[in-house]
Image (tube, grey):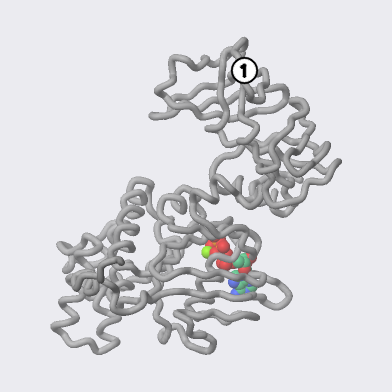
Amino acid sequence: MSPAPSAAFAQAAPSRAARGSIHVAGVAKAYGATTVLSSLDLTVEAGTFVTLLGPSGCGKTTLLRLIAGFIQPSAGTIAIDGRDMAGLPPQRRPIGMVFQNLALFPHFSVEENVAYGLRLRNVPDAELRRKVGTFLDLVGLGHLGSRRISQLSGGQKQRVALARSLVLEPSILLLDEPLSALDLQLRKQLQVALKEIQRELGTTFVFVTHDQEEATLMSDRIVVMSAGLIQQYDTPSAIYSQPANLFVAKFVGELNEIPGRIVAATAGTVEIDSPSGRHALPASGIRGFSPAPGAACVIGLRPERIAILPPDADTGGRIALSGTVIERIALGPVIRFTLRCGEQRLVAVRLASDAAALPEAGSACRIAFEPADAQIFEPLAASAAASFGEKP
Ligand SMILES: Nc1ncnc2c1ncn2[C@@H]1O[C@H](COP(=O)(O)OP(=O)(O)OP(=O)(O)O)[C@@H](O)[C@H]1O
Ligand SMILES: [Mg+2]
């Protein structure tokens, strides 16, 4: 029989269920005849960091504004901690919001900006001071409380905006591209700071960005959106390695695309004709469609899955193509290659620790990949191709 839990263990157990879950069911939003969001379903678990990622105009801000209650859905429901939010105004929802334009009071001090929401709620002075101090320390601005906003850098202002929302202790914080106006260095610092703060407080964060690297770095889960639809909702690593379709694969991480045509598809294998020959690929690489003989397809290969070998090398059981190295660029821990293989250009990324064994620009080479590393996609619809700047 297992021993009874100790008193210490019992005390450590959470005394109340975590707050801050969001349940979006069948939510649509239209303006007149224009549909901006089409029947979205999304569950955000309490205490997680979820990022909405997608191209401009796909509906990220619209979804945040619906959750916050600034606009109402045309259909569907939004519940927070199991409670339907229909008809509840923004100030009565347990939500804070940080916008891209920070909307701080420029002539107030940092402390006064952070205290503003607490004053509106008539929080007693001693408690107000304690909370403002705590949250300014949390965002690393404890020493700048008396500064005016107009005397701060962009990153410091961003931290004030964050403290101002967090001091009200919302169970959910919505952040609409809060880092996009900052330079790269500052942005990287704040990415780490934001993630740490989120972990420490256990607040649910719904964060919006266009930047796939930022999304991958910060999130527990990513919602990839395009044209008002959720394309995939999963962990960053699952989205990278098991993308739902070609849009997701191209939007998150780099992808080599080899055009092809399905010759035959059985339960285990798909045969594809491509400019580099006929390839038999495992059916486990099919992403989100049913391949029919004669249909066009795209073979997708991640750059780190492409090996570059001497022209006469034994490529084992791998698929091998002959090619030329066009460019070789050292990028710190990796080397990035541009390869040509017939009409096809491929990007490959190899570890710098293998530099000595890798060919120089101008060399002929063998390009090899494992059949299991090839992903098979349906080509993008013209509208989706346009969001990557591609012509149909
Ligand atoms: N009030 C409105 N009336 C009509 N159309 C609107 C309105 N608000 C937003 N839209 C449209 O809805 C679509 C989605 O807008 P939204 O602001 O949600 O995009 P987004 O994903 O946040 O884009 P960005 O990355 O550029 O901020 C856009 O095509 C936009 O023009
Ligand atoms: Mg937006």
- Decide if residue 219 is on the left or right side of residue 283: left
* Mark 1 CB lies closer than 8 A to ligand 1: no
Ligand 1 - quadrant of the structure image: bottom right
Please give the count of numbered marks on the rendered protein.
1
Give x and y (percent) for residue 16. Answer: 32, 79
The residue shown at (21%, 72%) is 111
Graded by Cα atoms within 10 Å as few (under 14), some (14 to 19) or many (20 or more), the crowding at tag 1 reads: many
The residue shown at (25%, 71%) is 4
The residue shown at (51%, 54%) is 210
Under tag 1, what secondary structure? strand
- Decide if residue 204 is on the left or right side of residue 303: left
Give x and y (percent) for residue 307. Answer: 56, 24
Q: Which residue was labeled with disc 1?
A: 366
Q: Quadrant of residue 313?
A: top right
Quick check: 233 above or below 343? below
Q: Amino acid at mark 1?
A: Arg
Give x and y (percent) for residue 38. Answer: 67, 70
- Decide if residue 123 is on the left or right side of residue 70: left
Q: Looking at the image, which is closer to me, 319 or 386?
A: 319
* Residue at the extreme front of the image, as rendered: 1
Give x and y (percent) for residue 1. Answer: 31, 66
The residue shown at (60%, 39%) is 255
